[in-house]
Amino acid sequence: MAEKDKVKKVGDILLNNAMYIIIALAVVYITIMRPKFLSLSSIVNVLSLTAAKLPIALGIGGCIVLTGTDISAGRVVGLSACISASLLTTAFKVFPNMTSPMALPVVLLIVVAVGAAVGFVNGFSVAKFKLHPFIVTLSTQLIVYGIILMYLMNGVNNGQTLSGLTEGYRDFITGALFTIGGVAVPKYVLYTVILTIVMWIIWNKTTFGKNMFAVGSNEEAANVSGVNVAKTIIMVFMLAGVMYGLTGFLDGARIASANANTGLNYECDAIAACVIGGVSFVGGIGRISGIVVGVLLLQIIFAGLTFLSVDPNLLYIIKGLIILTACAIDMRKYLVRK
């Protein structure tokens, strides 16, 4: 009997960590096939991509803690990137009457406000109208996409890609923070580290963070305990919207352009990273460190597949399988605990 228990325990450990094991094996295989995958330039590239994708995952993680999600995230990133690119450019196609770029802090405040506004609509609809987050964010995803298309048609831009960004904007985001072995680490890595620390403090050291986990664990119990459930839900979605706005601000300069497809499917990567990192859809479970690990693992595997010259179209299938597998493992853990 004891032997069976040991076998079962080992089996549970393997199943619960199956995603990590699969990714680890994939990395080993990629390294054997392409030794340059572990070169300094490749490692810095993976870390830079992780820093670029992390803010949106940090935002969407809070929504998942509440047993919800936010599929409007990618489009909010796209809108923020388009706003940033149109106001911090040398070719004023969207606003022909402008004669000089706006100040960086002003544009940053604008995109943060836009993200927070969309987050407020999402949170208010979920909290006050008791609508499912999937339906609400599906609606706002379509609305925001329509706004992006109309925004890009403004002035003389005629829906074209926005480019010609100012040197100050690009240098502020993608300029070298420092170099290591001749490889430059961009400044936005530092910004993401700061955002991660701030989110860790919010999640772990504030009353708001405690309330978020309480609502995610049991909304009725949290309400009885005196937690303002509606306010907490709205604030979680607004904070997520702020993170999407910041992601768009970083992305505009990082990619050096913005168009209607900027941010497309970003939410898929973010959700996958959160679930891999242990943020549970059953609610009330999640850690910032787990999200960081999840994003890092995803970027490692995607960069590795690129090294292997895998068909880019196949990456969508792989992403879908990762999300499905991660959610299945998460649900299995929940059922075992239950």
Image: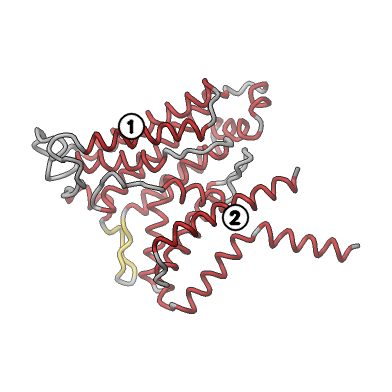
The amino acid type, in three-letter code, at marker 1 is: Val
* Crowd rating for badge 1 (residues with CA inside 10 Å; few <14, some 14–19, many 20+): many
Q: Which residue is mark 1?
A: 114
- Quadrant for the N terminus, please: bottom right
Q: Nearer the viewer, mark 1 or mark 2?
A: 2
As drawn, is 160 to the left or to the right of 79? left
Identify which residue is drawn at 74% across, 62% down: 11
Location of mark 2 (residue): 325
Location of the C terminus by quadrant is: top right
Above or below residue 210? Residue 230 is: above
Q: Height in image: 80 above or below 235? A: below
SS for dot 2: helix
Depth check, front residue: 285 or 187? 285
Residue 39 horizontal/vertical position (percent): 40, 74
Residue 105 percent location from the top left of the image: 25, 37
Is 159 left, or right, of 211 in this rendering?
A: left
Kind of residue at badge 2: Thr
Name the one closer to the observer, 321 or 23: 321
- The number of numbered badges drawn on the structure is 2
